Image: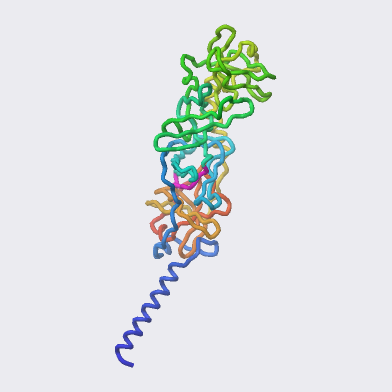
Amino acid sequence: MSPSRIAVLALITVTTASACRNQETSQGGDGGHGGSGSATSAASAEAIPLPAEVQKAPSVCTLKTELFRPFAEYPVRASGIAPPYMKVGTTGAVGIARFELRADLAIPGDEDMPFWLRVVGAPVELHGLAERTFPLYAAGPLALGAFAAALPHTELHVVKATSLELEAEVQLGESVEVVDGPLRARGPCGLFAIERRDFLPTDVIPGAKWKTTPGAMLKTGRKIAVSRLPVGEAVARIQVKPTDNAAVAVFEKVSGRAHIGWFGSVVMIHGWIAESDLDPLTDAGAPKGADGGATKAAVAPSASASASASAAAPAIAPAGEHLSCPTAVPLVAKIGESRTTVGTLRPSGAFDVIARDKDWAEVRVHVPLVTITEGTRLLVRQSDLATCKPKKDDAR
């Protein structure tokens, strides 16, 4: 065999061996329970490519908060067709003493595109897609049409978004009948928030002063017409249900008409009604949202409520290695065979490594008000754990 052919065969052999090694490196598991390893093995692992990030549509408004406390559970997805990989919020009591959760909500102008939600807790930053039904709140006193105003806990839903303004509406219960279309508010992005804030709803009513106690009761068993002025066409009708609080604030009375504010709905209804539609206040009409204290209590839980919620938080049992890293580590959500990069483990944030294999490690993080859904596995690359150290942290 000629020297030139020997050289060609040698080159082919070296190239083939290199390709095999590269194929072995690119393949691997996902932190399955069958594998094991340590930070030492992670140091020698080659970095493998990360999956694609969550796709974020161009947004026209971004709302931010330093204290995110959703009062219901909302699903968050890694893609528009994937099952939710996490839920944010709680259906129980919300304590505020033991955690801080920041959040950003990006709202696209395209009505067919979901919101983009990012939450940041002590150990982790996670982001994904939220439904367009995700609620907003008023950032301060906010009129909803000519006869209603948002309360601090009124949930608003975006119906239209542009670079100049948002338009949001509220879903009323059966107690209020609106004569002319849904109740909506429209204005700049800054009029809205993703957290409940404390304010006086009556600030939207010209000349009305906030009252700390109700002054009368709405009569039950009838539809009560509400007009914008002492004399005029009805813009809404109130029919108090047995479960409603019938107490109202009375701002003034003129010629048999009363200017009232009713807080028994999901919004404050204000306007003029017939004085004959009022009954004297009774003990049963003790303020439940018509006074400043009750309204504030609905926005900011008392210290005792916070302590109870904190005490009731489930304990997180330790598993595997308890680590923290000096730099941010990309975090991947795996549902079935689909993987998406959904955030990062934050520098110095504590997390548990519960399984390893050659390329991936499965981790667990504990963030109040964030629940990783059943069937979702959070993964990091073994190579990204090379500089991570054991973390002594008993508050887990």
- Left/right placement of residue 3 relative to residue 325 reads left
- In the displayed structure, 357 sits above or below 262; it is below
User: Residue 367 location in percent, x, y?
Assistant: 50, 44
Residue stretch in magenta: 121-131
Image quarter hosting the N terminus: bottom left
**Residue farthest toward the top in the current orientation of the protein:** 255
Q: Residue at x 57, y 28 (%)?
A: 266
From the viewer's side, name the closer residue of 380 and 254: 254
- x%, y% of residue 305? 56, 31
Question: Image point 44% across, 39% down: which residue?
Answer: 102
Predominant secondary structure, magenta span: strand
Q: Residue furthest bottom?
A: 1
- Asked if residue 57 is positioned above or below residue 207 in the image, the reply reads below
What is the quadrant of residue 5 in the picture? bottom left
Is residue 20 something that shows in the picture? Answer: yes
Q: Quadrant of residue 21?
A: bottom left
Indicate yes or no whether the magenta region holds residue 130.
yes
Residue 88 part of the magenta-drawn span: no
Q: Residue at x 54, y 31 (%)?
A: 170
Where is residue 208? Give x, y as percent.
49, 15
